[in-house]
Amino acid sequence: MEISNAITIDAGEPVSKAISKIKGSGLGVLVFEGKEYVGMVDERQLREKKFAPAKTKVGKLAVRTPVLSPTSSVDSI
């Protein structure tokens, strides 16, 4: 997947907005704070955590995943 096709959301947005993006695409969303990568949120995090969708910020649920490039080695993960 090209990063231009990735679905993103700002860490300060409510979880309810992430839910609508995930439901519309079936994919997780990449979470950013400004231009800085924070992590990702997918359906599993939404099912397993208890939160108030309109009040909880998506950055609180984001799980940090490895950042890879085409030249990354498996040993660097």
Image (cartoon, rainbow, N blue to C red):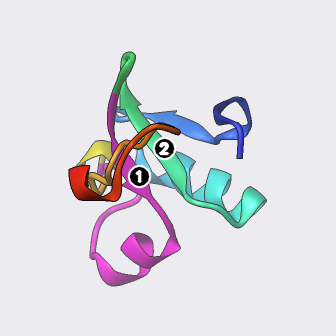
Mark 1 closeness class: few <14, some 14–19, many ≥20 residues within 10 Å: many
Secondary element under disc 2, as helix, strand or loop, is: strand
Determine whether, in the image, residue 65 is placed left or right of residue 4. left
Q: Percent position (x, y) of residue 53?
A: 41, 59
Q: Percent position (x, y) of residue 55?
A: 32, 49
Q: Which residues are magenta?
A: 37-56
Q: Nearer the viewer, residue 52 or 9?
A: 9
Determine whether, in the image, residue 28 is placed left or right of residue 5. left
Residue under label 1: 40
Residue under label 2: 30
Q: Are marks 1 and 2 in contact (CB under 8 Å)?
A: yes
Say above or below: 44 vs 63: below
Say above or below: 11 vs 14: above
Give the mark nearest the N terminus, 1 or 2. Answer: 2
| Disc 2 residue type (three-letter) | Leu
x 65%, y 40%: residue: 6
x 27%, y 75%: residue: 50
x 32%, y 62%: residue: 52
Say above or below: 13 vs 35: below
- The answer, for residue 54, to whether it is visible in the render is no
x 71%, y 37%: residue: 2
Q: Nearer the viewer, residue 35 or 2?
A: 2
